[in-house]
Amino acid sequence: MFVVSALLDFILLHTFTFSLPSLLCSLGRDTAPHRCQIKTGFILLLTLAFLLTAVAYVSEFSLKTAVLPDTFYEKVLNQTRSYYVVIEYPSASKNQTSPSQIPTQSTDMSVHHHVAHPSNYHFILDEPDKCSQWDPFLVFMVPVAPHQVEARNAIRSTWGNESSVQGKAVLTLFLVGLTGGPEAQQKLEEESRQHRDLVQSNFVDSYFNLTIKTMVIMDWLATRCPQASYAMKVDSDMYIGLENLMSLLLAPNTPRENYITGLLMWDRPVIRDKNSKWYVSEELYPEPKYPTYLLGMGYVFSNDLSGKIVEASKKVKAFNIEDAYVGACLKQLGIAPSSPPDPSQFRAYLGQYKRDDFLRVITTILGSPQQLIDIWEDLKRPT
């Protein structure tokens, strides 16, 4: 009502102030025509200024009275800002952390830091007692997108279905981030209740945030599964030769501490091409080459390293190439990745399927979930 009244007052004042000088000039009461022109111009300017003031007031009043709902999508959008933030390490434990308690974040898109330290996140879905019930010798942690149900089911029906290899307990878990919507979240929760093998944390699940995903994996291993002797971070499109892997870990010369092995990457240059998906700015990583690291498709490590890598990450600026970042954390710790006894067992691609080749390897990348199922069934058939 106040706004309407103010507008009416303005209209009346405008009519009076503008009409009176014009009337005087037209009647000849003001004998200086140039002064009539000046007065008229002045009145027009004054009117325009008053009009702009009224519009600004009404706009401000309208904005103040508009309240946006606190929706799930708004929360997810807030999470997205963690892509470009200055790294901070709050003292609160992750169990006390909620999305609203994530550190103050910069929205400057020219800053490409992101919050990689796991204390900035908490678990939405968790299996905190899994390792105490299972007492695994080896834990597979598989980072996977929430919607990739087919990939998870293929692993569940092949190498992820094995609970014991050469007499040692084996456990497979999947790590996901935010789903992006309530319907997808509900489906994920139903899947979790059915299989009891999902761990979810409240970071935006994206390629850029793979470093966050890996650090959350390390934190889960350190805090939820310290009794495991070894762990393996393995991508969801991988074939794993369980027998060969277990033979490697049980070999008498395989270290039980400070050990990590896989497909070694030496002298890899940092990509500075901004059009590349692997681009890293000099601000994030100033050195021209990465330290020696292990290709992220699948690397196995003694589980004491999980907590040590988390601690090292407090001192190593995060960047978006997750496997190279783990290499930077290892360098900070003074720990060098080990070459496997038989480097040919950690393969990126084997090419056309040959049964004997797959029987010899520990890792290789596959083209689809169905290919994993087909190959696994063939490898398990009697000869």
Image (cartoon, rainbow, N blue to C red):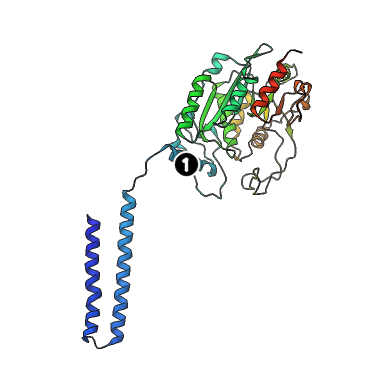
In which quadrant of the rendered image does the N terminus lie? bottom left
Of 318 and 52, the residue lying toward us: 52
Q: Secondary structure at mark 1?
A: helix
Under mark 1, the amino acid is: Leu
From the viewer's perspective, tell me whether residue 10 is left or right of residue 130: left
Q: Is residue 136 visible?
A: yes
Q: Nearer the viewer, residue 307 or 248?
A: 248
Q: Count neighbours of disc 1 (C-alpha within 10 A) and say few if under 14, some if 14 to 19, many if 20 or more.
A: few
Residue 305: x %, y % from top left: 63, 26
Q: Position of residue 169 (x, y in %)?
A: 63, 14
Horizontal and vertical percent position of residue 52: 33, 64
Where is residue 337 drawn, in percent x and y? Answer: 71, 30
Q: Which residue in the protein does label 1 denote?
A: 77
Which residue shows up at 31% across the image and 86% down it?
Answer: 34
Q: Quadrant of residue 346?
A: top right
Q: Quadrant of residue 248?
A: top right
Is 70 located above or below residue 13 in the figure?
above
Q: Is residue 189 left or right of residue 213?
A: left
Q: Residue at x 62, y 15 (%)?
A: 163
Image: 124 above or below 321: above
Mark yes or no: residue 103 visible.
no
Residue 86 placement, left or right of 338: left
User: On the rendered image, what quadrant is the C terminus found in?
Assistant: top right
Furthest residue in direction bottom, as rendered? 31
Q: Residue at x 25, y 57 (%)?
A: 3
* Vertical relation: 34 (above or below) 268: below
